[in-house]
Image (cartoon, rainbow, N blue to C red):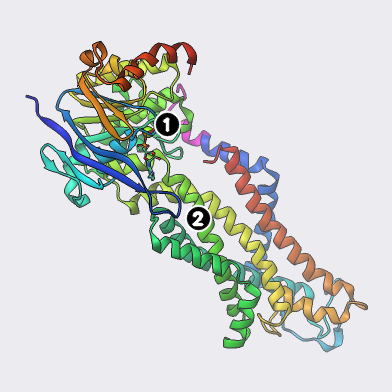
Amino acid sequence: MSGSELQLVGVSKTYPSPGWGRDEVAALTDVSLDVVRGQSLGIVGESGSGKSTLARLLLALEQPSAGRVLFRDEQISGRAERDLRLFRRSVQIVFQDPMSSLDPRMKIHDILAEPLRALGVEVDEAERVRSLLESVELPPSAAKRCAFQFSGGQRQRIAIARALGPSPSVLIADEAVSALDVSVRAQILNLLSSLVTDFDLTLVFISHDMAVIRHLCDAVAVLYRGSIVETGLTSDVFRSPREAYTQELLAAIPRIRAGRGRD
Amino acid sequence: MTLLAGKVDEAQRRSAFRRWRANPSALLGTVIVGVIALTALVSLVWTPYGPLAIDTNHTLSAMSASHWLGTDEYGRDTLSRLMASCKITMYVGGLSVLFATAIGLPLGIWSAWNKGWVSQLILRAADVLYGFPALLAASLFAAAFGASTNTVVLAIGIAYIPVFVRVTRSAALVILNAEYVLAALAYGRRPFAIVRKHVLPGIGSIIVAQMSLLFSIAVLAESGLDYLGLGTAPPNSSWGTMLQSAQNYLSSDALLCLWPSLAIVLCVLGFSLLSEGVSELRDERGGR
Ligand SMILES: Nc1ncnc2c1ncn2[C@@H]1O[C@H](COP(=O)(O)OP(=O)(O)OP(=O)(O)O)[C@@H](O)[C@H]1O
Ligand SMILES: [Mg+2]
C-alpha cells in the first residue's frame, strides 16, 4: 500500500543574512516534495543548494518560512513538540560527519539507548542495544566502548544503529557516506540498502553524488539553488534528463570519479 | 574491539589516573592546592598558637624552635597567622568563583542556545561589565557596605561573571553545533536534557580549568584588596593584611614580608598550574 510518509507543500525557508543588512538568504524556494511510503528517494544537488535545510525541515527541527510539512497527511510544521511523539519515533536521521555525529564522551551503549529512553520505548535496553549492533554488523562488545575508539565507517554504523533504535518507518540520510573513503562507502551503502529491505524503511537519501543515488534510490529529486528542478524515477532521470542542470550533474560523474582518487 | 567487556572501564580509569600523574602541571598543581586546602582545614581546629593571641614579651622575634616563622609586632605567631589566612583565601577564592560560575554558566549556555536579542543583550552587558575592574567595584562596595571579606567576595565574583559567560558560551557553541545534538533533538530530547547529557559533560573540563585559573587571580585580587584595606579587616589575618602591616618593618624584619608573599605566590602558582594541567589533559584526549 503506498501513500505519503512525508510531504513538503510549497515550502520556503529563509535565514536572516549574517551581516547587518536586511537581506535574507533564501535556502529553499517553493519546494513541493512527496516522500512515498516504501520508496527510496534520492535528493541530489551541489553544495549550498539547500539539501541539509530540507532535511531539517523534514525532521521538524526547523520551521518553514512559508508552506507546510506533512507527516502521513497531518501537518507537523508549527506543532508543539509534545504533539510530535509518534513523528519523532517514526522519522530518524543519519548525518554526514562521523566525527561529530556521536558524543565522544558517551559509551556506545548509552548512545544507542538514549533515543529509546527519550522516546519512552519500552524494551530491554541491553537486549535492544545488542540487536541494533548486530543489525549494523558490529560485535556486542562495542557497547562498552566510547565513540572515539571507532573508525569513521564504524561510527557511521553506530549512527545508523542509533537511528534504527526507535523502529522508524522513515530514515533520512544527509550525506551519510560522503565523508568515507571509497571501500568503506560501498560497505555502508550496501548495509543501508539491505536495512531498507529488512526493516521496510522509507529512505530519503541526500547526496551530491549522482552515482551513489543511482545505486540506492528508486526516485530522485534534483535541487538547484533552493528549488527542485527535476523529479522522476531514477532510471528515467538517468536515461533522459530533461534539465540542463541534471545533465551537467550526470556528466560530472566520471570526471569526479577519475579526479578524486581515494576521496 | 576484542578487549574484554568490563575490563575496559577499569583500564580507562587507570589510564586517566596515569595521564594525570604524568602531567607535571596537573600533578604539582594538585599537590600545592591540596596542601593549601588541607592547611585551611587544619587551621579550623588547630594552629600552633592562636592566630590572634598577642604576646608582648615576644614581639618581632626571629625564627626559633617555639615560633618557627617568628612573630609579628604584637607577638602573634606568624605560622599560625599564615595558616589561618589560608582559610580566608579559600573562602574568598572559592565563594567568588562559585558565585561567578553560578551566574555566568547558565547565562553562557543560554546565550549559546538562543541567538535572539536577549542573548545579544546578555553579551553586550557582559562586555560592559568586563571593562569594569574588580578593584573599582570593591572600592564602591567597601564605601557602600563597609570593608569586609564578603565585600571582596562580591566584588571579585561580579567581576568574573562576564569571563564565565564568554568562556561557557564559546565552549557550549562547539557542542551545540555538533551533529549529535541535532540527532538528539530528532529523537525528542528537549533542550534542558541536552544541556545535562551533552553540553555540561562536554564543557566540564574547560569550566574546571577556568574556575581554577580565576581562583588563582582571585587570590591575587583578594590579597591586593586586603592590602589596600578594602577587604578583610585587622585583626583578622589574611595574607594581604599581613603583608600590609609587615611593610612597616621591611628594613628590620624582611622575613615578615617574605612569608605572606611566598604564600600568595605559591597559591597563585598552584591554582594556575592546576588550570593548565586540566587544559593540557583535555588537549591530550583530543578535546574530549
Ligand atoms: N542556520 C543557517 N543560517 C543562515 N544561513 C543558512 C543556515 N543554514 C543554511 N543556510 C544557508 O542556506 C543555504 C543552503 O544551505 P544547506 O546547508 O541546506 O545546503 P546543502 O545543500 O546542505 O550544502 P552542503 O552540500 O554544503 O551540505 C546556504 O546558502 C547556507 O548558507
Ligand atoms: Mg548539507
Q: Is mark 2 within 8 Å of ligand 1?
A: no
User: In which quarter of the view is residue B49 placed?
Assistant: bottom right
Q: At which x and y percent is residue A54?
A: 28, 36
Residue placed furthest toward the right: B252
Q: At which x and y percent is residue B74?
A: 81, 86
Q: In the image, is B166 to the left or to the right of A42? A: right
B5 is within the stretch colored magenta: yes
Is residue B38 at least partly visible in the picture? Answer: no
Q: Chain of mark 2?
A: B
Mark 1 neighbour class, 10 Å CA radius: few under 14, some 14 to 19, many 20 or more: many
Q: Nearer the viewer, residue A207 or A129?
A: A207
Residue on which the image places disc 2: B168
Mark 2 neighbour class, 10 Å CA radius: few under 14, some 14 to 19, many 20 or more: many
Q: Which residues are magenta?
A: B1-11
- The secondary structure type at the circle numbered 2 is helix
From what the image shows, is residue A261 above or below residue B26? above
B283 is within the stretch colored magenta: no
Q: Residue at x 55, y 54 (%)?
A: B208
From what the image shows, is residue B221 above or below residue A102? below
Image quadrant of ligand 2? top left
Q: Which mark is residue A239?
A: none
Identify the amino acid type marked 1: Asp
Q: At which x and y percent is residue A14?
A: 31, 46
User: In which quarter of the view is residue B115 placed?
Assistant: bottom left
Q: In the image, is A140 to the left or to the right of A121? A: right
| Figure quadrant of the N terminus of chain A | top left
Q: Chain of mark 1?
A: A
From what the image shows, is residue A48 above or below residue B170? above
Is residue B76 at least partly visible in the picture? Answer: yes
Q: Which mark is residue A97?
A: 1
Identify the amino acid type marked 2: Thr
